[in-house]
Image (spheres, helix red, strand yellow):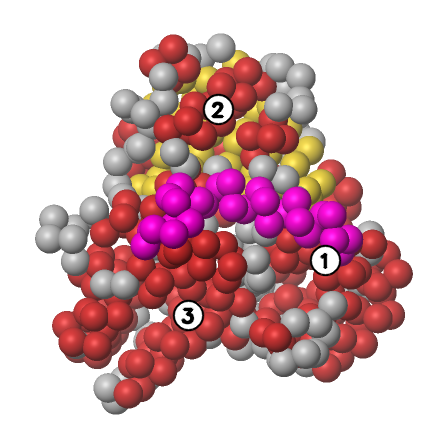
Amino acid sequence: MAHGTLTASKKRLGNAVHRSEATSRDGILERLFTFVFKGLVYPQIWEDPDVDMKALRLTPDSRMITIASGGCNVMSYLTANPAEITAVDLNRAHVALGRLKLAAARYFPNYETFYRFFGEADEKANVAAYHRFLKDNLDAETLAYWEGRDLANWGRKRISLFSRDLYHHGLLGYFIGIGHLVARLYGIDPRHMVKSKSLEEQRTFFDTALAPLFDKRLVRWATSKKMSLYGLGIPPAQYDALVSANANGDMSAVLRQRLEKLACDFSIRDNYFAWQAFGRGYAPDAGGSTGESGPLPPYLKRQHFEQIRQRAGRVRVLNRNFTEHLQTLAGDTLDAYVLLDAQDWMTDHQLNALWTEVTRTARPGARVIFRTAAEPTLLPGRVADRLLDRWTYEEEESLNLGGQDRSSIYGGFHLYIFKG
């Protein structure tokens, strides 16, 4: 990646996260977060795309914009057949991963190669497939990223991650790995969860093995530190929002509650988020050699591969700020907006700038979805009434869809519809 592009990427990330003076305690924490956030954070995105698509009601005429993150949901939205998707992200690693996935869908010879690369992501054959099918079809920035080396990979090329289990890497992969290590220190192996045969067995394992870990002194001490959740991609401002979900300001209690939903509310047989958390990868042979896929993101399921291959050209992935990109668009042009949890990071000024552009560019009936660390929507009282009055908050539907989100990490899911 060119030096100028890298510098611009760092500046955008700093503008999004830095709220405090550099010499203050919070300022130091914010700058440490931006330092670690520059690399790969999410090998897999942690928002449920099936819930997103229910809320967005995409049609063949839909033009949408989303934050890219790990790129899984961008790819999965293609199964709903929208006309156009623009994916933006402040993190150049996420941009490079999203573009790699699109190239793989277009240029890999078959589903088996695609699934081995992103579903298993742990074979040397993947690097050979990259050199044969993808390398010459990547743009210069994406090629420079995957051919580049960094300390996190012990000086190896980043593309080698796909031969060393991608899902054990990135900040999220390391965070999950540390969680497993701590559990094993107390004699608990989280992998036993994926052996459960029923919801009752899942509940029993959570109650007897996992839940007591959150009462351990080491766990309570570690989770009381804002840095402890950097591995989840949670900056200091969002940590504060998350801890507010507990009346006593007890982060270990909040995390226990979220993990309980992940472990107990959905069958392990169709929750790929639980497989990633407890099994550190997708279910063995989830690609289904005989046709029907196991617990996988929609884009990795065999039955969707040809659709995604045909529609991959409808997606653009840009290293850009969400608001900044909307400012370049004509008014009355977009139907769907996916903000993930980015608003938890924002100041009131940034929120109003964003919603000014969302409102300007939205077509009548446009839908906006986002998630929050705490349960309530954060917009009332922070975004100007003149803007919010043009939107309808679908409170009941938001609550219902939030309950269906298998990723289980967020406190709230929110849907707004543009009145016009």
Q: Is residue 362 left or right of residue 161?
A: left
Q: Position of residue 265 (x, y in %)?
A: 28, 58
> Which residue has dot 1 on it?
100
Q: Determine the secondary structure under disc 2.
A: helix
For disc 1, the neighbor class at 10 Å (few under 14, some 14 to 19, many from 20) is many
Q: Position of residue 418 (x, y in %)?
A: 46, 18
Work out which residue is located at the far front of the displayed protein and give it. Answer: 23
Label 1 vs label 2, nearer the camera = 2
Q: Could you say which is closer to the camera, residue 131 or residue 286?
A: 131
Q: Residue at x 54, y 21 (%)?
A: 357
Q: Position of residue 87 (x, y in %)?
A: 63, 41
Q: CA distance from mark 2 to mark 3?
A: 33 Å
Q: Earlier in the sequence, mark 1 or mark 2?
A: 1
Q: Could you say which is closer to the camera, residue 17 or residue 80?
A: 17
Task: Identify the magenta region.
Answer: 1-27
> Which residue has dot 3 on it?
175
Q: Could you say which is closer to the camera, residue 379 or residue 6?
A: 6
For disc 2, the neighbor class at 10 Å (few under 14, some 14 to 19, many from 20) is some
Q: Residue at x 39, y 56 (%)?
A: 28
Which numbered disc covers residue 353? 2
For disc 3, the neighbor class at 10 Å (few under 14, some 14 to 19, many from 20) is many
Residue 200 visible at all: no
Which numbered disc covers residue 151? none
Residue 4 lies within the magenta run: yes
Q: Amino acid at mark 3?
A: Phe
Residue 139 visible at all: yes
